[in-house]
Amino acid sequence: MKASGDEHSPLEAPNQKVSVVVPTRNSARTLSRCLQSIKNQTLKPFEIIVVDAFSSDETVQIAKNLGARILQRRCSPAEARNLGISASTGEYTLFLDSDQVLTPLVVEECVVKCVKDKVGMVRIPEVFVGEDFWSICSAVWKNKYEEVEYLYGAWKDLMHGEPRFFVRKLLEEVGMFDTSLLWGEDYDLYERLKRLNVKEGYCTSILYHLESVSPTQWVLKNLRYGETVPAFMRKTNKKIFPSMLRHAMLTFVQVLKEKQKPSVVIGCAFLLWLKACAMTIGHVKEL
């Protein structure tokens, strides 16, 4: 793939502007690596918009130092992304989390897919990376979760990861993210775009997800997810728990097949058990 500076590259067209939207809240640990990876792209994004929920750490200063435009509002991730879309001026929108790091060709490859293949949204492969025991267990689990989607998703009716790169006008046409959803809002957006017959592309360049998790954080996050799942099911009429159970069981089989260290297998099993308990409790609370 040619870099964007090549005189024959289709990326030189004047309307090939990419806006990157990054919601943050106390994200100082990883934000510098995230934003630097955006700045290191072979096709430089036109703008980086950080939507910050009034962080109490160095998040805002880091964003300023790395040239991001900063918007501040206490809101859900869906609202933060919608705010970023509304404030952006690029023809394409890339959504990143503050703990994600791009490899250098991601933006260029996504734009090429949109221009050459006439797609309206692009999936970017994600590799999870952990540094301490629990984050390593979480990374192993999530990487195997992605692997199961690739192996079985087409015939096991599994929920799967959604595109992160979009033609901006299509986001506006479908009404952007549904802010009533605190879980599954990205999947809901994806389903609405599919109903418009928006063509989907796949990027080969990857992004890294820097895992940081403790059992306490894991429980709190999945409690919150469990509380918000009923709203998602009411809106979409999807019975997602059978699909989630199939996906989890297939993932655990992949973990066992990989011959992980026994401690990691036990850690993955423990996180799965915590997730199931927390989501069930959260779900029951909202019934």
Image: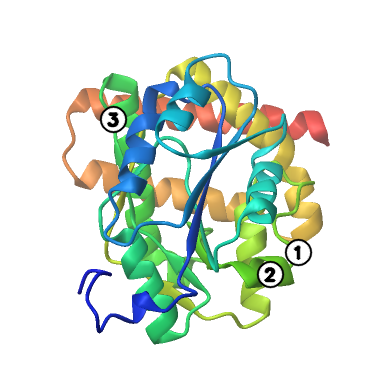
Compared with 275, 228 (above or below) is below
Which of the two labelled residues, at mark 3 and mark 1, occupies the earlier sequence position? 3
Label 3 or label 1, whichever lies nearer to me, is: 1
Q: Which residue is mark 1?
A: 175
Which of the two labelled residues, at mark 2 and mark 1, occupies the earlier sequence position? 1
Pick whichever, 55 or 69, lies toward us. Answer: 69
* Residue 202 x, y percent position in the rendering: 37, 71
Compared with 235, 48 (above or below) is above
Tags 2 and 1 touching, CB below 8 Å: yes
Residue 7 seen: yes
Pick whichever, 101 or 229, lies toward us. Answer: 101
Question: Which amino acid, mark 1?
Answer: Gly
Instruction: Give the numbered dot on residue 230.
Output: none
Q: Which residue is mark 3?
A: 130
Question: Which amino acid, mark 2?
Answer: Arg
* Residue 23 x, y percent position in the rendering: 57, 38
Pick whichever, 222 or 130, lies toward us. Answer: 130
